[in-house]
Image: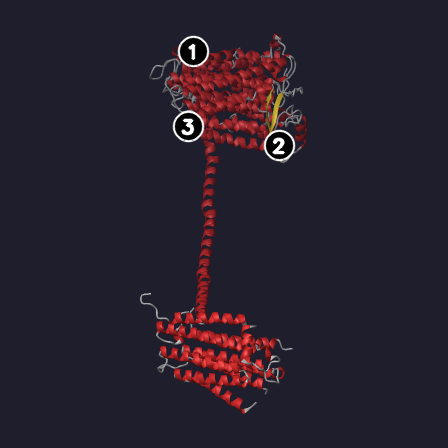
Amino acid sequence: MSVIFWLISAITIAGALFAVILKNTVHCALALTVAFAGLALLFLGLDAQFAGFTEIMVYIGAVAILVVFAILLTRGSETPKDSVYSRFPVAGLVAAAGVFAVLGWAVLQSASTLPHAMQTPSATAKEIGYALVGRYVLPLEILALLLTVATIGAVIVALHEKEGK
Amino acid sequence: MTEALASYPETMTCCATLATRLLWIVPVAPMVAAGIIALLKQPYRKTAQILAIGSMVLSLAISLFAFSYTVGGWMQGITIRETVNFPWLHFGTTAVELGWILDPLAAVMLVMVSFVGLLIFIYSSGYMAHDENATRFFCFLALFAGAMLGLVISNSLLLLFMCWELMGLTSYLLIGFWYFKPSAAAAAKKAFLTTRVGDIFFLLGIVWLFAQTGTLLFYNNGAGSIEHSALALLLTQPAALGLSAATAIGLLLFAGAVGKSGQLPLHVWLPDAMEGPTPVSALIHAATMVAAGVYLIARVYPLMQAGALTGGTTTALTVVTWVGASTAVFAALIAVAQNDIKRILAYSTVSQLGYMMAGLGMGGVAIGMFHLITHAFFKALLFMGAGSVIHGCHEEQDIRKMGGLKADMPITFITYAAGMLALAGVIPFAGFWSKDGILEAAFTWKLSNVPFFMLVFGALLTAFYMTRQVSYVFFGYWRGHKTAHESPAVMTMPLVILALFAGILGFFGTPAWPWFRAFLEGHAAPFELSVLFEPELAILMGVSTLVVMVGIVAGWRIYGEKSPAASEPDALEKAMPGVWKFLSNRMYVDELYEVTFIRFYSWWGKVADVLDRRVWGGAVAAVMALTALLARINRFFDTTFVNGGFDKTCEELATSGGLLARVQSGRVQSYLRILAAAVVALAVILVWSSRP
Amino acid sequence: MTPLTAHLLVAALLFAIGLAGALTRRNAILVLIGIELMLNAANLNFIAFWRYSPHPEALTGMMFAIFSIAVAAAEAAVGLGLVIAIHRHLHSTDLDQMNRMKG
């Protein structure tokens, strides 16, 4: 494994870590963005260029912005008075640690049996496009529907209620 | 001429002819009339009278029909004995049967009872004219008549007993008819209880007979309880004291007769029974009910006759004779010293019943029954005459307050005199022939001749006290206050009819023409006047006539010639004050019973009461207390442990529920935590279980 | 340590971090951030497996990841809209105070 990989991984994990640790919510959002960026680089490193750029465009370009908007709209920029952690944070940590332990153990256990491809696959936009409208046309259409519904729904949910309703 | 033991011939026609088949109407008609009268209200006395008298007329008609049929059979030389039996109570494979019978004995008795009953019913409608409860009276009277007629025709000892008890009930109701008089109520109770004592033994006898022979029917084509095979069986069964079962049962049945017929020692109820209205005394306590005991003995005579003969007679019959003779003398002695007109007649009845029993014991069925039939007529006559006298003297009953009535009440006097002569036994009245038959049987009794002398003495006394009574009442001067008057025709007519019968009835049983005996025993009755002049018989007739004359003359000399004043003590009392006191107090028999039995019984009642209230009541109270205690303990357990435990448990459940509910905090993150942990656990389990 | 294993471990770590954040932070938006991290970790898994799969020309993993990204975007929009709506009612984004579903 190359150094680049470990570096990028470190950045990603650091970003994720800070995203959940920092007190100021806006800082958390920014750290999240760093994490997303790191992930995108990892995708690129895995020869999944389309996925990486999609990651950047959608997650960093939309989701992170949304998060920031939500934080700003809910006055999350103010420093909270109480602790940022909920009651009994240890329980959560323990649960997370347990999950990681299981997953890690599963991965390491089956390390020998995991596949190991040689050549670089080609995943050009053209091929992805063909796949999208060919084999995966149904999920595509459903996804379109879903996005429509989600957008409309989000708008309705977040809409100011009319006075006297 | 006399044979102490006669037996019935065995000629039996078993198929029931019309007369027998109609016979059930005879008792049922008066009972139905009683039932209808019971539903009537008080003012309907005329209807009640018509119903009662009508039913008796019907019964009389059918009785006469049956009688003529029986006589017709006798004239052809056949002894009719027809039965109609039916099973009544089934249990298991056996059944208790009831039934009725038509034979000469029953036929004669039927005619007597229904005829005398009818006359007394007619008499009652006059006697009870002013009584407001006349309807009730006729109801009871009709019921009684039905019961008596039922007893006469019954072929089953059980049916006889049922009618017996029914008669006891109606006797109680009629003696206590004027129930508002304490003396009447007490007398009714006394009658009922005293006869009850006899009835207990009677019932024992019935049960024993049923147990031994398996049937209570008298005649049942050879299978009856007093027919040959049953008697043979009974003779082989031993009872106590060396007696056979036949004798023992016979004595038990006789005990019932002792109670009902007022023999010594159960005679105490009969004089007190005079508290009832005079028609009641006439019918029940002279002619019919008290005769039922005699009739019973006559019915079960084969049973009494069965057994070892000692001195020519069985033990049972010996007992009957002695009891009868003793009663005859005993009651006659007491009658001499009584002052109530009805009481004299009552004791006279007791005495004459003693004669009947003695006659049965010594002479057989015909002798006893003949006296029963004649006595019924003239005693009913005497009682009804006494009733007429009482009615005419404005309800006065003490003979010392009467007198000289032969001028004021001539019809009553003549008929009463006829009855008195018949009772005393003056030839040629009926009483002479029937009593003479008994004296004859007593004279020839092989076992002893003491009864003969007792009966002769009794005849002397009878004549004496009757003369005394007649002298006091009809002769001399009037000792009362208001003038006496003759009774209305409805009352004197029956008297006349009965007086006629008292005169002529005797001729059916004279030695010259023994029709009655021949009829009952089923052989020819030759008319031989020469029999009367056989030396033995003639001497006997002469002796009895002499005795009677002595009695009458003595009575007349003492009471009739110089009529005593009302307040003066009796002549005999002056002569023998001690004896007189003893006799006029009825030989203190009632007082003896009071001191012994009654006192014992009331003591026993007190003991039973204490036992009941203290011992049993205490036991019950103890059980109650124990139960209450147990209930309290139970409640304590229930409240403390059960309730407490239950409540505690519920509290615990609620608390734990509350505790568990805290898991549902409503906070999403805790849910998520639990989810994550669960997934981890699940994954571990899956991996672990899939390891080889 | 093959590259695949490394990638998988990184993804697992990312997932754990995201889970920890979702389970421990008080602010609702940070819970959503945690969820986004988890989704991304899953995406990384998909891509890694696709890259080192025997038939990468089937593009299965890639398509899955693309679709996942799209769906995650939609879900983020709706979720944040919800948070804003809740904030309007409760005037706070504190998850500890949102316990109306308490049993």
Q: Residue B308 placed where, x, y %? A: 66, 27
Quarter of the image for the C terminus of chain B: give it: bottom right
Identified by mark 1, the residue type is Ile
Callout 3: residue from which chain? B
Q: Which residue is mark 2?
A: B95
Pointer 3 or 1: first along the chain: 3
Q: CA distance from mark 3 to mark 2?
A: 42 Å
Q: Which residue is mark 3?
A: B184
Q: Residues within 10 Å of mark 2 (few under 14, many from 20)?
A: some
Q: Can residue B372 be seen from the camera position used here?
A: yes
Q: Nearer the viewer, mark 2 or mark 1?
A: 2
Picture layout, residue B682 above or below residue B108:
below
Name the disc covering residue B449, or none: none
Q: Indicate left or right for B196 with C91 as reference.
A: right
Q: Residues within 10 Å of mark 1 (few under 14, many from 20)?
A: many
Q: Residue A76 placed where, x, y %? A: 37, 80
Pointer 3 or 2: first along the chain: 2
Quarter of the image for the N terminus of chain B: give it: top right
Callout 1: residue from which chain? B
The quarter of the displayed image where residue B82 is located: top right
Are the numbered discs 3 and 2 placed on the same chain, yes or no? yes
Q: Nearer the viewer, mark 3 or mark 2?
A: 2
